[in-house]
Amino acid sequence: QIQLTESGGGSVQPGESLTLSCAVSGSMFRVDTLGWYRQVPGKQRELVAEIFRNGRTNYGDPAKGRFIISRDNAKNTAQLQMNSLEPEDTAVYYCNLKQPVSGTYWGQGTQVTVSP
């Protein structure tokens, strides 16, 4: 059974930085595409950033120019470095794993709050 565990959420002030981490555990041949999504009440979950196994990245509009996603294939982890945070970035952030055969997996979510 594959499990995703997020860490690093919290409360910060506008302009500050925060780094989220996601650790993948369980039985799998290899970890494919890892990503981060976020959701606020009443809205759909949206892509923040994703990184493919070969290191290629794809960023959602809210993250472009401010956030950096990275991964460590040896440790099956991914990180999301979030810079210049704004109140609009307040959301629950979810780690996501897409496997070509077994499907999509989600973490439990971690709250990020940006307020003065």
Image: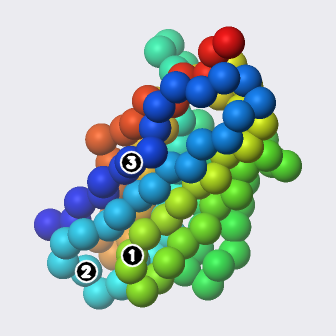
Secondary-structure class at tag 2 = loop
Of the two numbered discs 3 and 2 in the rendering, the one whose residue sits closer to the viewer? 3
Q: CA distance from mark 3 to mark 2?
A: 22 Å
Residue 88: x, y in percent? 69, 21
**Residue 101's image quarter?**
bottom left
Q: Earlier in the sequence, mark 3 or mark 2?
A: 3
What residue did someone put label 3 on?
7
User: What's under tag 2, amino acid-wise?
Assistant: Met
User: What's under tag 3, amino acid-wise?
Assistant: Ser
Q: Nearer the viewer, residue 12 or 23?
A: 12
Q: Nearer the viewer, residue 72 or 105?
A: 72
Residue 104: x, y in percent? 36, 58
Residue 96: x, y in percent? 43, 54
Which color scheme does this rendered protein use? rainbow
What's the mark number on residue 76? 1
Looking at the picture, does residue 75 appear above or below residue 41? below
Residue 39 appears in view: no
